[in-house]
Amino acid sequence: MTASVPEVDFSKAHEMQPYLTEPEQMYVGAPGKHGYLKLRFALDSTGKSILREIDRRVPLIAQQELYFDEELPGMPCLYILSSGGPNVDGDRYQQDIIVEKDAMGWISTGAATKLAEMKFNYSGMIQNITLDEGAYLEFMPEPVFPCRHTRFICDTKLTVHPTATVLYSEIYMSGRKYYGKGEMFDYDILSVHSHGHRPDGTPLFNEKFIIEPSKLHPQQLGVMGNYEIFANVIVMAPKEVFEKVYAEVTPRIDRENGIATGITTLPNDAGLLFKVLGSNTGKIKKEVRQFASKVRMAVKGKPLPEEFPWR
């Protein structure tokens, strides 16, 4: 029997109230517009980390895990793909990612995520990431591109055992810089919410940012300044791990390379929050990978390998 797809409903989100009109094309959550993906990593009988379970609904696609990480050859690596092209009006997605006791995994996307122009409704995604005792996960997707009049909301819930470690990153572009006259900060709204919990339900932290460029342009003092791209990285880890990483990171403003970085600890000894501002995608991704490498070294004693040239 095919399991039902969980409902993805953001209708109570105050910031999305202006965008509840039903699209004139395919309705909200229609087949092909209501994607679901469940991934469960676990140990097999030999102690090897494998992708134990996968459940997917179009347009979300994930294929067999690969073992291409030269530094951690026993870590299953997986790319999330989409058969439907960009996110469009009325799309709803949910991704449930589970890493069982002592297992590990690496997840990314096959390419950047494009958020298409929207006229009536919005695109929404729910992500539930759960790590059991001693688990380890690196979730490092490619950047998100919002086009003109994009409306996008994302809610990510991280439920992590005190002995587990998750690195969750997201990179948001300001728009298509060289498309026509450019679409820099021409999107309507980005609403991004991340929150951490323990397995017993104890809340640890909340971070939510709502960007509406027509109301408050991000390129001003105290927000993003002259930068065009921002990266947000959350690390939930045991205290001895995140304290070691924190001591190795120095916040800086590198005007020559157009990069600014900052780091802080999360409440309730939950972990770290690392942020990067810049105007060059490659440099932003490099900063995120260098930080992720420090986290991996603190947990696994191995760095991240060099990024593939085509990425």
Image (tube, rainbow, N blue to C red):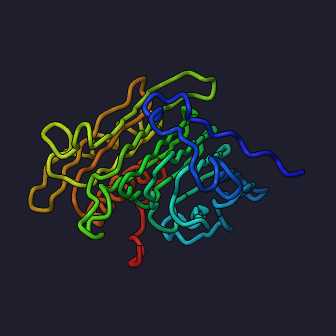
- Furthest-right residue in this view: 1
Residue 64 locus on image (x, y percent): 68, 68
> Picture coordinates of residue 4 (x, y %)?
79, 45
Residue at (74% x, 55% y) in the render: 55
Vertical arrangement, residue 248 with respect to residue 203, above or below: below
Can see residue 77?
no
In the image, 160 versus 163, the foreground residue is 160
Q: Position of residue 83 (x, y in %)?
A: 61, 67
Q: Is residue 82 above or below residue 167?
A: below
Q: Residue furthest front?
A: 24
Residue toward you, 248 or 223: 223
Say if 105 sits above or below 165 in the image. below
Q: Residue at x 41, y 51 (%)?
A: 150
- At which x and y percent is residue 192? 43, 40
Vertical placement of 182 versus 5: above or below?
below
Q: Viewed as shown, does residue 53 lie left or right of 59?
A: right
Total numbered badges shown on the rendered structure: 0
Q: Is there any visible trace of residue 83 in the rendered image? A: yes
In this rendering, would 55 be left or right of 76? Answer: right
Pick the quarter of the image with the C terminus: bottom left
**Residue at image coords 42%, 23%:** 268
View extreme (bottom): residue: 309
